[in-house]
Image (tube, helix red, strand yellow):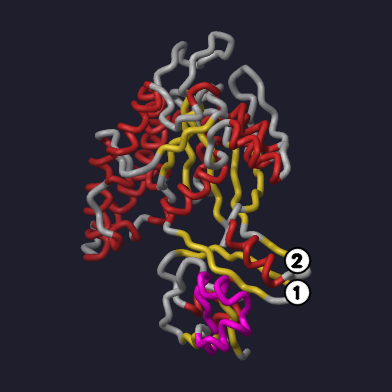
Amino acid sequence: MSLQCGIVGLPNVGKSSLFNALSNAGAESANFPFCTIDPNIGIVPVPDSRLTTISNLVKPLKTIPTSIEFVDIAGLVKGASEGKGKGNAFLSNIREVDIIVHVVRAFDNDDVIHVEGSVNPGRDIEIIESELILKDLDSVMKREDRLKKMAKSGDKATKQQLEIIEKLKAHLDDLKPARSADLTFEERQTYKDLFLLSEKPVLYVCNVDEEDLPNGDGNAYVEKVRAIAESENTEVVVVCAKIEAEIAELDDEEKKEFLSEMNLESAGLDRLIQAAYKKLGLITYFTAGEKEVRAWTIKEGFKAPQAAGVIHTDFEKGFIRAETIAYDDFINYGSEAAAKEAGKLRSEGREYLVKDGDVLHFRFNV
């Protein structure tokens, strides 16, 4: 299961610098608007100490982490929904992602131009959110017009869809995002083909100066973003793009030493991925054998056959059972054989809900 995070924000907030640090993909970064035009994509391995621990026990020929995609989408500006600043192209890129990572400038520096002339996180967030909503409103109004014509036939299902769209339109008219509309899951399914931008979950990333990073509290700008995030039931990750760029150049041991010197428990990448997983309700399971130890990403609530299908569709179609060992048991006993001998290997059927950290071996027949 591939997870794609779209990095958005106003020009010159540090998006491309953060992207470079996270993906080490070498996206161009400069002190002028629209440096990024075509979206850059970086595929990043997801850090997970459990995978390393399992691999150290099994000693496979290769170890494969699960991965996450970061998409660096060009800086949006006021009027993007009307096409300003190549807005139509930029907004269309957002439709493809699973979650929006909204980078907000939370530092003062006269040498770095701010497209709005001053640092104001609340205003910056409102600009981006409003452009997404206005673009969605355009899509919803077109759907409303079509449904009104179809509803003249008296079709009950069409009338119900029209009522939902009209309710959503009123919500968007108030410049409120689609994700906060008072609609049920079933009602949202009636317009999911519109791929509304403001329906997507959002994480906020505050880009701060180096001196505001170690204590994790950030600064007054960060507090403003935290208040907004709390009202939207989401999270804020505080990073310093400059520091992340330095960390990206280090090996594992150097990274640990650097983080220790900076009084940081983990790198911004780790915290960002953890926040994204939590927001999207994702978990990880593992497969372990002599040839390969591998991590797999699935949605929380996946049953065993669905989890098997992430490896290959044939595994789901021909699913028989999942031989399951909890992560703690696998580590405590040191191997699959020892865990089985201790009675810790379970044979689970089709209704088993896979748990985070499970070590699984699927039996199937095609």
- Mark 2, residue position: 62
Badges 2 and 1: C-beta atoms under 8 Å apart? yes
Magenta range = 320-343
Q: Assess disc 2: are there few (<14), some (14-19) or many (≥20) residues with their C-alpha within 10 Å of its C-alpha.
A: few
Image quadrant where one finds the C terminus: bottom right
- Where is residue 66? Give x, y as percent: 62, 59
Which mark sits nearer the N-terminus, 2 or 1? 2
Q: Quadrant of the N terminus?
A: bottom right
Q: Where residue 297 sits in the image (x, y, percent)?
A: 54, 63
Residue 337 part of the magenta-drawn span:
yes
Q: Dot 1 surroundings within 10 Å: few (below 14), some, or many (20 or more)?
A: few
**Residue type (three-letter) at the residue carrying disc 1:** Lys
Q: Is residue 145 magenta?
A: no
Q: Which residue is located at x 46 percent, y 15 percent? A: 116
Image coords of residue 7 (percent x, y): 54, 38
Q: Residue at x 37, y 30 (%)?
A: 225
Q: Residue furthest top?
A: 110
Q: Residue at x 50, y 16 (%)?
A: 115
- Please report the residue visible at 53 percent of the width from the left and 78 percent of the height from the top: 325
x then y, percent, for residue 232: 31, 41
Residue where numbered disc 1 is placed: 291
Q: Is residue 29 left or right of residue 212?
A: right
From the viewer's perspective, is residue 71 above or below residue 242? below
Residue toward you, 186 or 203: 203
Left-right relation of 24 to 182: right
Depth order, front residue of 41/236: 236
Residue 206 tag number: none
Front-most of residues 168 and 328? 328
Element carrying mark 1: loop
Q: Quarter-wise, where is residue 11 in the image?
A: top right
Amino acid type assigned to the residue bearing label 2 in the image: Lys
